């Protein structure tokens, strides 16, 4: 074998036995080649130890818009890890994280009208990838005081990675500081070269009984690179030609999805078409508002998607789901909670011409119960109108409330103060103009 895996296993054992056993290990696992090698070496190292008293969390994030082929494979692997950890008495707990409802791709794009992401407005990585994992890491820091995060980052992958790995090194230690307080990073496989990695995975069977061959085939068919677990903005992710979100419009072409379709996964074609719609829509002025969600018009910047585009895209998405489910009934492109959240957001944005339940029933021919989301918002508005009496007061308070709610329902009060001040400022300005 081209790299000294035995020396690496011994080094991992040494790190595991350090007198800081209260600090759990959190292994970032994406199911890709790097994190598979990392977990495999950690598993083999710890398995040989008579005392395994340090907890190991295997954390894997699902953006809910993962390539369905990849997520299917990763879910299968995670199940095997859980089963084998139990059978082999390994101190391994698998944790799958997902974005908070208010952060999911569809809630932001269809619900709030955020344009599909690009390099200038890349609103997705933090919401879909960084926040869910950070939340889990913070929970563990709060439970244990400190944590050690194991990442499959390798210098070989890019010059940038090599630079990032050098930063924050703790002198005389294999650990480096993470940007989160009380968190350290151990990049155990940083010096393993890509060719050696593949050779190792091809030769050494998976200790949790998954098939490394399947992983190799998946990479081959998708002609793809890796998308590691993204835990902060310095972790490389979402670059070109790798497994990422199937909706990704940050990359020009989703080469991995194209390659999968070429290799026989024809059922993915509707996903490619949807992605193309997303890619072209972001620069199409006819489907974008001229003002931002806060009502402010900014030079050279378009606002959110118009209501008709949001409704039309939801219809396309549900139609794609219906088509795909003929052959792949287990694949869901959007979930029920997201549909409810979108309906609530449409009403918060005063969109009453379109209704999620109606779009749904037009596509599937069945009704969906969105648990009175419409009634609740309508009732709130009626109560507010009664209380205000004056139409103008009602409108202003309603708009301020909408602003406040769009921030609180999405658990994000960032900028609320500014938005409220801007809104009030504009109201006063309009008043003054009226009086002139
Ligand atoms: S893969 Fe693309 S869509 Fe997904 S988080 Fe990264 S940049 Fe955003």
Image (cartoon, rainbow, N blue to C red):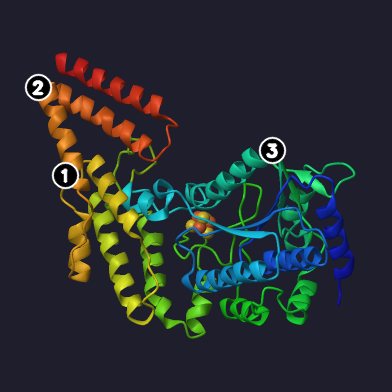
* Residue wearing tag 2: 389
How crowded pointer 3 is (Cα within 10 Å; few <14, some 14-19, many 20+) is rated as some
Disc 1 CB within 8 Å of nearest ligand 1 atom: no
Depth order, front residue of 31/209? 209
Using the numbered discs, state the Cα–Cα distance from disc 1 to disc 3 in whole angstroms: 46 Å
Using the numbered discs, state the Cα–Cα distance from disc 2 to disc 3 in whole angstroms: 54 Å
Depth order, front residue of 250/83? 83
Q: Residue at x 25, y 60 (%)?
A: 312
* Residue wearing tag 3: 145
Residue 4 quadrant: bottom right
Judged left or right of residue 111, residue 414 is: right
Q: Position of residue 411 (x, y in %)?
A: 41, 38
First in sequence, mark 2 or 3: give its number.
3
The C terminus lies in quadrant: top left
How crowded pointer 1 is (Cα within 10 Å; few <14, some 14-19, many 20+) is rated as few
Depth order, front residue of 187/142? 142
Disc 2 CB within 8 Å of nearest ligand 1 atom: no
Q: Position of residue 72 (x, y in %)?
A: 50, 72
Judged left or right of residue 258, residue 367 is: left
Outermost residue, bottom direction? 264
Q: Residue at x 68, y 36 (%)?
A: 181
Residue 315 quadrant: bottom left
Q: Give the vertical position of 419 relative to 191 (above or below).
A: above
How crowded pointer 2 is (Cα within 10 Å; few <14, some 14-19, many 20+) is rated as few
Q: Residue at x 25, y 50 (%)?
A: 343
* Residue wearing tag 1: 375
Front label number (1 vs 3): 3
């Amino acid at each position: 074998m081209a790299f000294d895996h035995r020396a690496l296993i011994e080094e991992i054992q040494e790190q595991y036995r350090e007198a800081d056993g209260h600090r759990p290990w959190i292994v970032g696992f994406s199911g890709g080649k790097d994190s598979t090698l990392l977990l495999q070496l950690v598993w083999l190292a710890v398995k040989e130890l008579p005392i395994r008293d340090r907890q190991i969390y295997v954390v894997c994030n699902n953006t809910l818009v993962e390539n369905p082929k990849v997520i299917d494979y990763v879910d299968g692997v995670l199940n095997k890890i859980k089963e084998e950890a139990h059978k082999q008495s390994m101190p391994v707990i698998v944790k799958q994280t997902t974005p908070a409802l208010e952060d999911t791709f569809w809630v932001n794009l269809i619900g709030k009208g955020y344009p599909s992401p690009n390099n200038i407005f890349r609103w997705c990585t933090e919401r879909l990838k960084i926040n869910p994992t950070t939340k889990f890491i913070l929970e563990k820091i709060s439970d244990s005081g400190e944590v050690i995060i194991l990442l499959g980052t390798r210098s070989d992958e890019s010059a940038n990675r090599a630079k990032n790995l050098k930063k924050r090194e703790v002198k005389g230690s294999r650990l480096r500081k993470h940007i989160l307080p009380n968190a350290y990073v151990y990049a155990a496989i940083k010096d393993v070269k890509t060719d050696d990695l593949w050779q190792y995975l091809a030769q050494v069977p998976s200790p949790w009984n998954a098939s490394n061959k399947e992983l190799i085939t998946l990479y081959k068919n998708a002609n793809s690179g890796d998308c590691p677990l993204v835990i902060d903005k310095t972790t490389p992710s979402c670059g070109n030609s790798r497994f990422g979100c199937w909706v990704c419009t940050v990359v020009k072409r989703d080469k991995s999805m194209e390659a999968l379709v070429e290799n026989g996964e024809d059922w993915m074609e509707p996903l490619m078409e949807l992605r193309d719609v997303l890619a072209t829509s972001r620069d199409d002025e006819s489907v974008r508002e001229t003002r931002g969600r806060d009502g402010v018009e900014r030079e050279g910047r378009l606002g959110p998607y118009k209501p008709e585009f949001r409704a039309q895209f939801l219809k396309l998405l549900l139609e794609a789901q219906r088509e795909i489910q003929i052959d792949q009934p287990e694949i869901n492109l959007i979930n029920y909670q997201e549909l409810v959240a979108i309906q609530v957001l449409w009403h918060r944005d005063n969109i009453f011409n379109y209704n999620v339940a109606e779009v749904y029933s037009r596509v599937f021919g069945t009704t969906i119960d969105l648990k009175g989301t419409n009634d609740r918002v309508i009732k709130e508005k009626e109560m507010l109108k009664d209380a205000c009496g004056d139409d103008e007061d009602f409108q202003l308070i309603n708009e301020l409330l909408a602003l406040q709610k769009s921030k609180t329902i999405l658990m994000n009060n960032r900028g609320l103060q500014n938005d409220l001040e801007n809104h009030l400022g504009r109201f006063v300005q309009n008043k003054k103009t009226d009086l002139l």
